[in-house]
Amino acid sequence: MADPMDLGSFLDQWAQGNPGRADIAVAVIRLSEACCRIGSLVSLGPLAGGLGSETGQQSGADPQKEVDVRANDLIVAALKDAPVATLGSEELEWALPINPGAPLAVAVDPIDGSSNIDANVSIGTIFTVLPARANGVDTSSFLQSGDMQLAAGFAVYGPFTSLVLTVGNGTHIFTLQRSTGQFVLTTPNVEIPASTREYAINGSNYRHWDETIRTYVDDCLRGQDGPRGKNFNMRWTASPVSDIYRILTRGGIFLYPGDLRENYNLGRLRLVYEANPLAWIIEQAGGAASTGFDRILDIKPNTLHQRTPIICGSKTEVEYLVRLHHDPHGLGERSPLFGRRGLFRI
């Protein structure tokens, strides 16, 4: 049996004879090296110092943690000799010039799920590679729709370290071989099952959701006795990379909708460096990703840190929820007596 292909060989094969692809490959390799270093740091836990301590700054919707800053620094260092003009990061208010005039721009969430660091729950890193625009060092490079992505991936730091990657030829999972420090291809051409019985959402926000999301979750909770006619499991880790990885390996749907809380009306995930790369990875694996109304990859960002609602995963389930958003009472699947269209509807 042949040895598994390492990430470098995979990218060399993909980029062969194409200088533009070769630049993308270099950027991905540098990002993977940063992920290896971040994984080593995270694996030390309390031995690395107070990774979960707060810096006094904000990181997205959460207080910034020490691990966020240290991971960001490792990514900046890794990209110094890459063909990357500028870096956009959740940890930086503005785009950071790296190598002005280079052809690529990179956007990252250095640590996704950093609130879980002290609980020893899987966390990760998300990245996207885009063509650099204008002078390559301002935010204009990041104000492109997700369809313009050249590469996207995320690492998961869990019982083992995985790197999920797409360069537009399917979604592939690599696993870190610690003895060599290389990522090796372990699951090529991931295919997400089209239907599912598993959903991931933070149920504690139920009272803040709109009627459509509550209807969907209520129907899942009713199981085989409800309008869906089947039992569902709910999973939630508060680390989107962990929930998305699970969906890639066994199907499911991930929901982070907008809600009525202050500053959450447009959702929580950042479009450029969280939702877009995750959506492309999902689509390349046969799934779907939507706001509930619009395809994620069709949205043109207005700002680097713009938020968006996201519903992604198994295609049939996402399409069902999109139809529910467009016509909440048109599916004909509510219970005739006790459903939201029934005789006892309030």
Image (tube, rainbow, N blue to C red):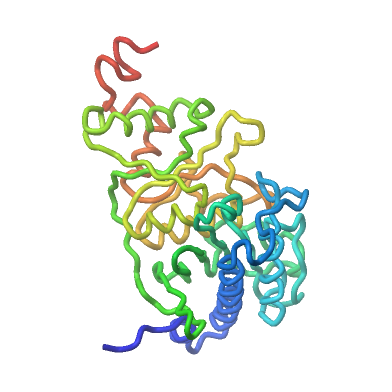
Task: State whether residue 295 appears in this view.
Answer: yes
Task: State whether residue 165 appears in this view.
Answer: no
Q: Residue at x 25, y 28 (%)?
A: 227
Q: Nearer the viewer, residue 170 or 207?
A: 207
Whether 232 is drawn above or below 144: the answer is above
Whether 30 is drawn above or below 201: the answer is below
Q: Residue at x 31, y 56 (%)?
A: 250
* Quadrant of res 29: bottom right
Q: Nearer the viewer, residue 259 or 327?
A: 259
Q: Residue furthest front?
A: 47
Residue 307: x %, y % from top left: 62, 45
Residue 63: x %, y % from top left: 70, 47
Image quarter (top left, top right, bottom left or bottom right) of the N terminus:
bottom left
Image quarter (top left, top right, bottom left or bottom right) of the C terminus:
top left
Q: Residue at x 49, y 85 (%)?
A: 180
In the rendered view, does 229 fall on the left or right side of 121?
left
* Quadrant of res 330: top left
* Quadrant of res 43: bottom right
In the rendered view, does 178 fall on the left or right side of 329?
right
Counting the numbered discs, the total is 0
Whether 256 is drawn above or below 173: the answer is above
Residue 208: x %, y % from top left: 54, 28
